[in-house]
Image (spheres, rainbow, N blue to C red):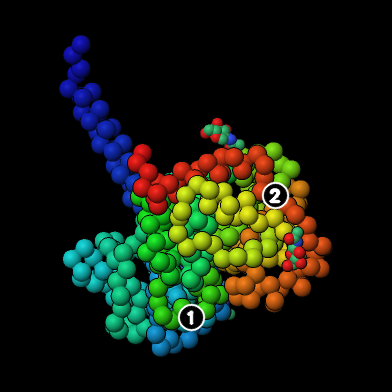
Amino acid sequence: MDIPIKMKKVQRTGTLILSMIFILIIILYKNYSNGRCTEPKSKNYNSKYCINEMDRFDWYSMKNQNSSIPATEVSTLYAYKFEHEITITLSSWKFIGYRVHCRYVDKDGAEIGRPYETFSYPEFVVNCPKRDGTYEIGLSVEEFGSFKPLPIIYRVLKKPLFELSMCVAPLYGDEPKWLMFIEMIEHYKLQGVEHFYNYIHEISDYDSKVIDYYAGLGIVENHYLLEKGLRTDRHRHINEVVDCNIWSRGHSKWTIFADLDERLVMTDYPGTILNYIREVDDEKIGSLKFRQQWILKTELMPQEYEGKDQLLQWMAAHRWHNSTGIARPGHTTKCIVDSTKVFIMSIHLVIEFFPGNGYYEKELKPEEGLVRHYRDQSLGEWGEKWLKTVMEFGPLRNTDYPRKYIGNLTENVVNTAAIVYGNLII
Ligand SMILES: *[C@@H]1O[C@H](CO)[C@@H](O)[C@H](O)[C@H]1NC(C)=O
Ligand SMILES: *[C@@H]1O[C@H](CO)[C@@H](O)[C@H](O)[C@H]1NC(C)=O
Ligand SMILES: *[C@@H]1O[C@H](CO)[C@@H](O)[C@H](O)[C@H]1NC(C)=O
């Protein structure tokens, strides 16, 4: 049918007006999303830009009591790009409230814009607003001082890639690690852990073979804490916990923070750790705390692989049973956290959740879950220093690794060791 010319004109005008409205909406939306929560109470309020209804950078500043101390040097670890900021982790000890400058670098190595003055808060963390075209980022003490550009780990994710992961405390020291490492990975895999954020301070060539093997499978990713300045075990461990809280943030729904010799296990609860966290139905729970039980480890692990019989004798789950009582609530607990909810993480507990949502820690009863900690008695003189203290939790008794999983654990450890160290061709 033929449409009269006048009608066509009306139609065209209508389309034009509609397109203009559409463009206007896009412009308004873009402006709103570029601004950082200037009108927290408006109906366009996007909580993601804000913390507790404040612009997040103002909130950091308020937490830091709006002061910043001049720094003399700053050493950086890793940089992460999130939807609303770039977060840089540090290794400088007790570095909180110090003034530094964000330095933005484009693909060609040219600096973008004027350096942005910011500060470290909380300890070991610096946040920088995002800038278009940023390819690498660094921190300098002086506005135009020297800096080391860091590659940026991409964390603008719509949803987590993993449901359950683990942050492993830094590896260091002379005790051979290969067997403990395999057993740790295979234990947690059976519990539903999909990914391991692993930290290396020192590792032998022999032990690194199995780390490389798992990295090749994409199960393990490594971060390195190699600096000489990282003097004490505790310093490195805290750096790891702070960095891993950010590394895992939004990347894994739940993240276990534990050590090479610690095995979180479910006790009377019939399923795996993954089954358990899937049943957590209170959004306010930001952390699940597991109480400790020490299993006395009295010999150092074997240097090199010798075959299946050796593994059956030396796997921690087979070799060590002499156990302390269960530590009292809150004592040296280990946690599984949702790191999107955790503002400040520590080794045994969450120090501070992001505010406003009532997040809290839930401690499991020993009948639900526990940490089986194969604690070496000689390393760090633990037996001499601590055994007496932990004896207050009850007399020593023999305990076993969960019977239900020992078969599969053994088989998987034996297979992996044979592939990596026994030249088994698969
Ligand atoms: C710190 O800064 C924030 C945001 O700029 C402001 O709301 C707050 O009143 C300041 N606090 C102090 C103690 O100056
Ligand atoms: C358990 O360890 C304690 C302390 O080292 C020791 O005295 C005891 O004999 C051990 N028990 C067993 C059954 O090995
Ligand atoms: C042990 O492994 C077998 C074979 O992969 C699997 O069918 C079984 O469910 C596993 N058992 C446990 C308790 O994980």
Where residue 271 appears, as percent x and y from the top left, is 65, 39
Q: Nearer the viewer, residue 221 or 20?
A: 221
Up/down of 6 relative to 355, above or below = above
Q: Could you tell me which residue is drawn at 56 percent across and 75 percent down?
A: 234
Q: Position of residue 337 (x, y in %)?
A: 59, 55
Q: Which quadrant is the N terminus positioned in? A: top left
Residue lying at 62% horizontally and 51% vertically, measured from the top left: 318
Q: Residue furthest top?
A: 1
- Residue shown at the point (81%, 68%) measured from the top left: 392
**Residue 409 location (% of width, % of height):** 56, 44
Examine the rendered structure and indicate whether residue 312 appears above or below residue 37: above
Nearest to the eye among marks 1 and 2: give it.
Answer: 2
Q: Quadrant of residue 384?
A: bottom right
Badge number at residue 231: 1
Query: Taking 95 as reference, is 31 above or below it?
Result: above
Secondary structure beneath label 1? loop
Q: Which of disc 2 and disc 1 is earlier in sequence?
A: 1
Q: Amino acid at mark 1?
A: Arg
Residue position marked by numbered label 2 in the rendering:
400
Query: Which quarter of the frame holds ligand 1?
Result: bottom right
Residue 259, located in which quarter of the rendered image? bottom right
